[in-house]
Image (cartoon, rainbow, N blue to C red):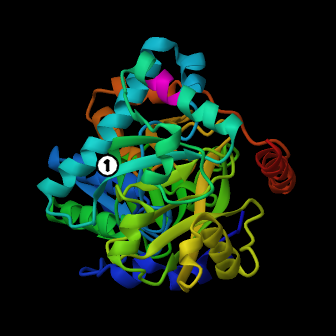
Amino acid sequence: MHFLSADQDLTKHSYYTATAVRSAAYPSLQGDASCDVAIVGGGLAGLSAALELAERGYSVRLLEAREVGYGASGRNGGQAIHGLACDIDEVELQLGAQDARRVFDMSIEALDLIRSRCRRYDIDCDWRDGFLGVAVNERKATSLVAGARHLADRYGYPMTIVARDKVRQWIDSPRYLAAVHDARSGHLHPLKYTLGLARAAARAGVRIHEGTTVTGLAHSPTPVLHTERGRVSARQVLLAGNVYLQGVARQLERRIMPVGTYIVASEPVGDDLARQLIPSGSAVCDNNFVLDYFRFAVDSRLLYGGRVSYSTATPMNLAQSMRKRMVETFPQLRGAEVTHAWGGFVDISMNRAPDFGRLPDAPQVYYLQGFSGHGLALTGLAGKLVAEAMNGDATRFDTFARIRHRPFPGGPLLRTPALVLGMAWYRLKDALT
């Protein structure tokens, strides 16, 4: 699959890239090397695993095709939210109530892990507490409130259910009928956080190689990663490149699909207006299947996401169409211009549950993928879990690994058209119900 051309152009217009300082550059791999663990992918999952392993005394090399934080880790909506992209009932159906509770609790641990890493490694990533889930109609309002009560009753995770007549006090928008507030979730500048983890990993002894594309993996008898300018042999390997692996492990590609997701940033609108629109300063997301999500950055710009592309083609007139959605949500911003528009690909699985495991014919090769647009917090925990597994305790990693995944139908040629048709149905369903 080759789907990176549109993605490459949009990185130039990222608000995150414009406001994060890359204080370090990491040399590309030159020649052959060996280590305890080799990691493919310089995003949050790979960096988290590298840091955890290095602090356990392992020699680690991390290979990144472009630059640290180039992919979804450095370009996402910045929302760190409880749970998974899929409904927790999907996990309970597969694993049972006890392990589903363990999975959910680990998603909360993932939130706490961000806060603790920011303190421990002195990462200034503009973290702010608070997440507001909202609903646009009566049916979705009923579902939103029922979901909040279910998490409180069955998983011990209480949230504030906002009274109907108080919703405009939490979000000053005509669109929303219901809201629930989660004080433990939050939002941050994802590229600043990713770069901070890279600095911490490098200080811990991880050898990071940017500009180093992995072209192949041989795993018998010892795993070897091939690049254009050298090879890395290792006792264990982690594949954390998601949709960017492209041929390194083809057996994994059938279980994830690249979905383009896009965000715009407004010009600064002033702290007073930002506080009026979202008084709590929380990140906001609706509960549509094809959803909108937004939050104010520290400089009072509204970062608004909501357009997706299941064909891997960038939508036409992206900034204008996204600005239209932004103004429909907040008419108070009709005079605000859009200054940045960017996007990239996330990796979705069929059931939207994360896909962790080992290659069937090479148990020393681990993989992390399928975060399905809900991975800002969970990627960090995933790196910790795989480090635990490589260090001899796979209990928590294997809980996730037991979640079953099916390949997308249609084969290499028909998978994308089939997904486009399916998502068109969900858009229609969102509009009609």
Residue, x 20% and y 52% (percent of image)? 117
Position of 286 with respect to 236 (left or right) is right
Q: Residues within 10 Å of mark 1 (few under 14, many from 20)?
A: many
Residue visible at 68% across and 74% down in the picture: 324
Q: Tell me: residue 47, above or below residue 354.
A: below
Query: In the figure, is residue 14 to the left or right of 315?
Result: left
Q: State left or right for residue 136 relative to residue 356.
A: right
Splitting the image into 4 quarters, where does residue 405 fall? top right
The residue identified by callout 1 is: 49
| Magenta portion: prevailing SS class | helix
Please say whether residue 245 is visible from this viewpoint.
Answer: no
User: Does the magenta run of residues contain 165?
Assistant: no
84, 217: nearer the viewer: 84
Q: In which quarter of the image is the C terminus?
A: top right
| Number of numbered discs overlaid on the protein picture | 1
Residue 34 is situated, as x and y percent measured from the top left of the image, at 30, 58
